[in-house]
Amino acid sequence: MNTFLDRFFLLRQTPDPAWSRRRLAVYLTYRGVMLLCAGLCMGMVLLILAAGPYDNEIIPSYFQHLDLLLLNSLPVALLTLFFYGLFGRAWAAFLAGGGIFFGLALGNYYKLHFRDDPLYIEDLLILREAKAMAGGDHYNLFFTKKILVVFSLLLLGTLLLFFLVRGRITGWRRRTAAAASTLLIAAALTPLYLSKDYYNSLQNYEYLNKLSPTQSYIAHGFAYPFLYSAKDFVEFPPSGYSKRDAAALLAQYQDEDIPADKKVSVIAVMREAYVDFSLYDIPGLDNSCYDPYHALEAESLTGDLLTNIFAGGTIDTERCFLTGNYQLHNFRSNTNSYVWYLRSQGYTVEGSHPYYQWFYNRQNVNAYMGFERYRYLEGDYENFTARYMPEDAILYPEVYNDFVKNKSTGKPYFSFVVNVESHGPYDTRSNWAGIEYLTGSQYSDACKNAMNNYMASIMRGDRDLLAMVDKLRADPDPVVLVLFSDHLPWMGDGNIFYEEMGIPIEPEGEEGFRLHYTTRYLLWANDAAKSVLGGAFTGEGPTISPCYLMNLLFEQCSWEGPAFMQAMEDYRAVFPVVSIHDAYVVDGIFTYEIPKERKELFQDFLCLQHYWRNEFIQESAT
C-alpha cells in the first residue's frame, strides 16, 4: 500500500533515490516553478501599493501592460530564488525576498503620501534621516486596507509554501550554485533595467502626467522604477565620454585669482522652503507681511532659481550652488567645489546649520567640499536653545558674530548658512502662532493652519534676517549677501493645500514646471562692498539653475574665478536652465529636448560636468 508521500511525492523534503529520472525531474521542476510563480505573484501584489495616494484606477493599468508586469515582478522572483539558494527552504526564501520588497514598497507608499516623492535607491543611504523625520509629530505612519491586503498575502504565500514546497536544497555547493545562478540572471537583466530608452518607451499615462517625475515613476510601477533609479545612484559617464577630452575642455580655461583689492566677504544663506506667496495671487492672504522683505529686494539683484527639487531634498540645491554641478553624485571623498577655490584664495570658509550634523551626512560632505569649520546642533547650537529646530533668532546673530570674529585674522570671509526653523511639515491641527495670514471660508481648517504656521515661521525668519542685514549695512567692511531658497514648501499630503489655494503646482508644460520648481534668489551688497566692487547689485537678474548661482555672484563681484566656472559661464549663455528632469532653457526657449544644433555643445557640457564631479583637482585645494 502506497504511503501518503508516495502518492504526493512533490511534498517530500528530499527525493527518493529509487525514483526514476522522470519523477526526479518533475520533483525538481515543481520546486523551481512554484517558487518562481510565488515571487512573480508577490511582485504583482506589491503593485497595489505602487500608486500611493493617486487614483486607484492606476492599479489595473499595470495589468494591461505585460512588460510592466514582468519588469516589476521579476526582481521579487529572482530575490526569492536567490534566498532559496542561501536558505534551502522555500517558505523562508519567499518571506525574505517578498518581505524586503514589501518593506521598500511600503516606504515608497508612505513617501508618496507625505512628500509626493517616490523612493529612490539613493534614499537607502539616508535611512537615519528618514527615521528621524518619520518620528516627528506630523509624519504619522498609518495603516490602510491596501497595506493589510499586501501583508496578508505575503503571510499567506509563506504559509502555502511551507506546506506545498517542502523540498529543500541540501549541501553548501548546491545552495551556492543556485544562488550564483540567480545572480548571473540578474546581471544579464541589468542593462535592460537601466536602459533609459527602454524605460521611456513604456507608456502608461492614461491617468498620469509623463512630465511629472513622480507620476512618471508611478506609471512604471514600483520595483522597476526603483531599480532604474540606480542609474542616478551609480554615476555612469555620458555617451562618448573621454576623460582626456574632458580634461582638454577644461584646459581651455585658466584659474584666475581674485584681485586683492576686490576680496570682499560673502555670506550665503539658503533659507529652508522659503517662498514669497504674494506672487501667487492667493485670495485671503495678507500680502503686506512680505513688505519688509520686498524692501530688501528693491535694493538687491533678484531673480528666479529653477531648482531640481520640490518640497524636499534640500541638499540638491545646496550642493549644486557650492560645487557648480547641475546634478549631484554621492560624495565619498574630497570633491571639486567653489569652496576649495575660495579657500585657495585666502578666504576663511565656514558655515552654520543648526541641526544634526549626520543629517544628509553634512559633517563629512561639507569637509569634502572644503569647509574648514562648520557649526551644527551637536555641541553648539543646542547650547543656545531647547528647540528641536533652533530658531533664526539664534542663528543669524551667531552668523554675524562669526563674521566679526574673522576680522581679527585679516582674511576675507565666506560663510554658507542653512536655516532650519522653517522646515516642514507644518502643523495642520491648530494655529499655534495665533496670527491669521490666510483667511477665508473656502479653505479647510487644515489648509489655513498649515499656511498660518508656515507664514509665521518665515515672517519671524524675515525679521531676524533683516536685523542681521541692518548690522551688515552699517558695517565698515565690505560684504555681499546671497539669499536663496532650496525648494517650495510642503503643503499637505499630495499637495492638497496648493490645490485649495488655486496654485496649479503639477509640472505640466512650461508654466506648471516653473511653478513646481521655481524659488527666488537675492544678491545684496553693503555700501562698502559696492564701493570696492563698483557694482550696483540691483535689478532683475536672469532665470538660472542653482549650479549657476555662484557664477552670478562672481559676475556681480567682477571676479573671473576658477577655470571650471569660466567654462560654465560660457555654457550658461546658452543653457541657463539645466534640470535633471530633462527640462531646459536653450537660447532663451523652454524645451524638453536639446535642439539638434546644440546637442554637441550640450554633450561637452555633460562631459565636463562628469569630469568635474569625479576628478578631484588638487591644485584647486592648495
Image: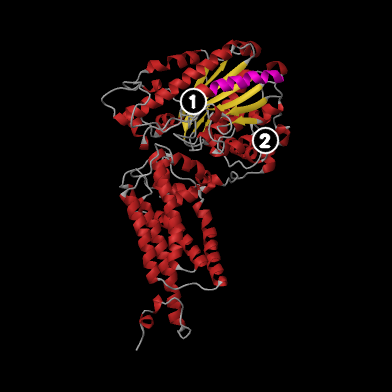
Q: Residues within 10 Å of mark 1 (few under 14, many from 20)?
A: many
- The reply to whether discs 1 and 2 touch (Cβ–Cβ < 8 Å) is no
Q: Is residue 443 visible?
A: yes
Answer with the quarter of the image where residue 622 lies.
top right
**Front residue (pair 66, 9):** 9
Residue at 33% x, 27% y is 448
| Residue 45: x %, y % from top left | 36, 56
**Front residue (pair 315, 569):** 315
Q: Is residue 68 magenta?
A: no
Answer with the quarter of the image where residue 279 lies.
top left
In the rendered view, would you say 445 is above or below 260?
below
Foreground label between 1 and 2:
1
Instruction: Compute the Cα span from label 1 to label 2.
Output: 45 Å
Judged from the image, the secondary structure of the residue bearing numbered disc 1 is: loop
Q: Is residue 63 visible?
A: no
Q: Main secondary structure of the magenta part?
A: helix
Mark carried by residue 391: 1
| Residue 54: x %, y % from top left | 34, 43
Please name the colour scheme applied to the rendered image: secondary structure
Residue at image mark 2: 249
The amino acid type found where label 2 is placed reads: Leu
Task: Specify the segment rendered in magenta.
Answer: 395-409
- For marks 1 and 2, the one nearer the N-term is 2
| Residue 290: x %, y % from top left | 42, 17
Q: Residues within 10 Å of mark 2 (few under 14, many from 20)?
A: some
